[in-house]
Image (tube, rainbow, N blue to C red):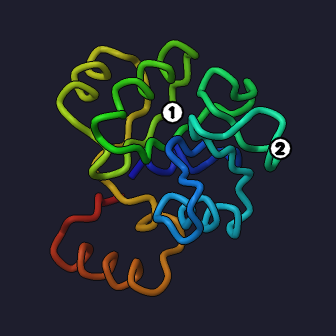
Amino acid sequence: MKGIREFLDCKKIAVAGVSRKKGAFSVTVAEHLESLGYEVARINPNFQKGRGSLNEYSTISELPSDFERVIVLTNSKNSADVVSAITEKGIKQIWIQQKSENSEVMNMLASYDCNLVWGRCIFMFTNPKGIHKFHYSLSKLFGRVPSE
């Protein structure tokens, strides 16, 4: 829980892999974090510089330096490129959303000095509602939520 709390402690979070499609899981994550008061930078290689919102970027390298936390919500086959860009930028707070990790990503991060949260759903630790609250309750019941 310490690493999760440390990650969520800052109110500026970048989300890599935000879809352009309304209602997509990644969009829901970004909107949920914004509803909790986080400033969210959305990253998608299809976002064009100068179009859309001020917080849309096509690459990790475009992120302003005050965004020091990234949630990786990409397809697992694209995650290694994203994680490589994160480490090149020197970002030390990384959350790999469950199903975005793979062995290549985990090997890359094994020797990288960072606070890494992986295999966890961001909703579970950010005031879950609806189905996410139910999922959290079940996970806690079966001992799958990290203890304090």
Query: Where is residue 78 shown, x and y percent of the image?
Result: 35, 33
**In front of the other: label 1 or label 2?**
2
Q: Residue 130: image x %, image y %?
A: 45, 87
Q: Nearer the viewer, residue 31 or 144?
A: 31
Left or right: where does residue 134 sit relative to residue 94?
A: left
Above or below, 135 against 110 in this view is below
Q: Does residue 138 sit above or below 126 in this rendering?
A: below
Q: Which mark is residue 73?
A: none
Q: Quadrant of the C terminus?
A: bottom left
Circle 2 residue: 54
Residue at horizontal 54 percent and vertical 53 percent from the top = 19
State the CA–CA distance, disc 1 to disc 2.
22 Å
Residue 108 vertical placement versus 72 (above, below): above
Tags 1 and 2 in contact by the CB under 8 Å rule?
A: no
What amino acid type is highlighted by mark number 1? Gln
Question: Residue 27 placed where, x, y %?
Answer: 57, 61
- Closer to the chain start, of discs 1 and 2, is 2
The local crowd at label 2, few if under 14, some if 14 to 19, many if 20 or more residues have their Cα within 10 Å, is: few
**Label 1 belongs to which residue?**
93
Amino acid carrying mark 2 in the image:
Leu
Please name the residue shown 40% across and 24% down the image.
81
- Pinpoint residue 114: horizontal percent, then vertical percent: 43, 25
